[in-house]
Image (cartoon, coloured by chain):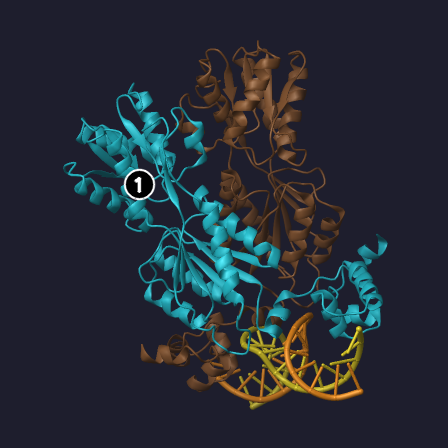
Chain colours: A cyan, B brown, C yellow, D orange
Amino acid sequence: MTDTTALLHSTPPRMSDVARLAGVSKMTVSRVLAGRNVSQATRARVQKVIDELGYVADAAAGALSSGRSEFVAVLVPSLSSSNFSDTVRGLSTAMAPHGLQLLLGDTDYRLDQEERLVRSMLRHQPRCMALTGGQHTEATHTLLKRAGIPVVEMWDLPTDPIDTAVGFSNVKAARAMVRHLYERGYRRIGFLGGASELDRRGLDRMRGYVSEVKALELGAPRVIRVGESPITMSHGAPAIAALLEQWPDTEAVMCVSDMSAFGAIMECHRRGLSVPGDIAVAGFGNFEVSACCHPTITTVSVDAYGIGLRTGEALLAAFGSGSSRSGETVPARRPRSIRIEYTVVPRESA
Amino acid sequence: MTDTTALLHSTPPRMSDVARLAGVSKMTVSRVLAGRNVSQATRARVQKVIDELGYVADAAAGALSSGRSEFVAVLVPSLSSSNFSDTVRGLSTAMAPHGLQLLLGDTDYRLDQEERLVRSMLRHQPRCMALTGGQHTEATHTLLKRAGIPVVEMWDLPTDPIDTAVGFSNVKAARAMVRHLYERGYRRIGFLGGASELDRRGLDRMRGYVSEVKALELGAPRVIRVGESPITMSHGAPAIAALLEQWPDTEAVMCVSDMSAFGAIMECHRRGLSVPGDIAVAGFGNFEVSACCHPTITTVSVDAYGIGLRTGEALLAAFGSGSSRSGETVPARRPRSIRIEYTVVPRESA
DNA sequence: TTGAAAGCGATACCAG
DNA sequence: CTGGTATCGCTTTCAA
């Protein structure tokens, strides 16, 4: 390891250094790195030098020269939500085998933040981009159009997608849950949601609740909205407290997320209310806690990991004719919507 | 928006396009973008063209030319663990104001995967790197040394850090928890951990448990190891089942993570065992669920977000004299260890 | 299968 | 305060 030490204070090796020491041209080194046609003997010699030197190719130079990066830009509202981190895992699984790096951003549910991140990520010339949701600023739309890269919107099915959408209707999923509660015999049904106007998927679930309650003629909607997204366990207690104060005779409550459902159930226990005996509670998202806790929580299961995987596949497919520096625009694929299944999972709590 | 459409099928604008249309040189455009000294009038004119064109500077070209990127490489064992995602949030909070982009990687607790990711991230010439834990392959060490960038190891305090460490002793924290249980009067104390040899922090907690049990002369350690990291809620049930089968008279059990503690408590409920009446259960990490569930879970609180924040600050401080392309190596800062506080949080479960 | 030359799009550096 | 010129490290392209 003495030569390692010797190398410490010098500038890192370049491709030309490798070439010189291996007695070949830069191009041959480049080909070895790219796994292209190089004779076995030459390849071995070059690889040996690479290893000895600890040579690491400069991605920026490569990107500049070839006009294509190995980045996939991904924007989610929150990295702390297990739903979105599952989606990221799915995307990562799809992309990693192709040597693509995720460039991850966290919009905090804000469209202005999303716009800022899109702009900042576009600087790195990503091969494609995955966004969450179907709502974006005007500027974001323009930036994305001009970038001419494949775009997928996840977790929703916008009526007018930018390019491809991979998701499901949160409105319909919420309606399905209300129907489930109805079929179980519950009539006075409430909804616990977040206070933020920015969480579109949360709002859609609320809209779904309201319209199904109307369709089933279950009386005036009972909606409580507490706290900012991402919804956490601690949102549940104050929300159900408010609900029970305003409508004490509520029989069942559906929550915008399993997180708040769990918090609500714990608060019920604290008050000596049995679930579902005194009040039924349902969640959304099928988070791990729902299957583990007591009682187990009835929820809507969504394949978050699958959304990431399918998004990755859609994006990879769109590369097929991908443009490089040559300025050719991506051929106009017609916008597609890829529907992800969701299912109501009946458990003990409702 | 008609000219927007017109632009769609042409190659994206370059700095030279902006310069030409604004009637200045590229350098002036570059200065406007960098916020350097440019007269108000010129700046306004250039900015106008930038906005009209929707010009986005190419980061790869910038990085190549300046010899410095705006990337911060971050490696965590798992992005799904709320502990690590909190740390990532902290890092992101520290770095974002400086225009730095996190390059996130997920090692899945494997050192070979870490090595692969380090190599792949080094290709992007990150300004610095944050790793989790103090154990790395020989090649990883060499790569990092040669890269000559500031490195922080998080969540641990290695005896021989590469550069800077920001963390705490998992061994000592676990010992503190055993002492807490001892002070509460428990004597026959078990430990529920993961089966993986790769999760160093989990292993350290186990080692801490074992040594404190010995120090307090509590008899032979009662260790159950189930499941791979990251430890989830579903690990708790089989683990406590195994423990109770092997040592039915156990009075208290400490878990490697709040996740398994929660799962274990739910399993106790299922079996009609009261917690802490029949058996006390403690966790580690102070995850949200521990404060919300019933009974609330006694745990070790670690400031995961703070680890990220402090790591970011340490890294930013190390940039001060940061090297650019000029090949100057970072002056040898002596390795530092930044200790993060942890506290035993007594709650209902133990 | 290999090599030489010509950029890619920005910034550093030095003049003016 | 502004502009010209020379890179930066790699890949493309074409020729041998």
The image shows residue B237 at horizontal and vertical percentages of 52, 23
Residue located at (74% from left, 74% from top): A27
Q: Is residue A242 visible?
A: yes
The image shows residue B3 at horizontal and vertical percentages of 35, 80
Residue located at (65% from left, 57% from top): B120
Q: Check disc 1 and report the residue beneath it.
A: A227
Residue located at (65% from left, 19% from top): B212
Relative side of B247 to A91, left or right: right
Relative side of A182 to A90, left or right: left
| Of residues B303 and A222, the one drawn nearer to the viewer in this rendering | A222
Q: Is residue A124 visible?
A: no
| Of residues B282 and A183, the one drawn nearer to the viewer in this rendering | A183
Relative side of B170 to A52, left or right: left
In the rendered view, tell whether residue B228 sits above or below residue A24. above
Question: In what quadrant of the picture does the C terminus of chain A appear?
Answer: top left
Label 1 marks a residue whose chain is: A
In the rendered view, tell whether residue B255 sits above or below residue A221. above
In the rendered view, tell whether residue A207 sits above or below residue B221. below
Res. A336 image quadrant: bottom left
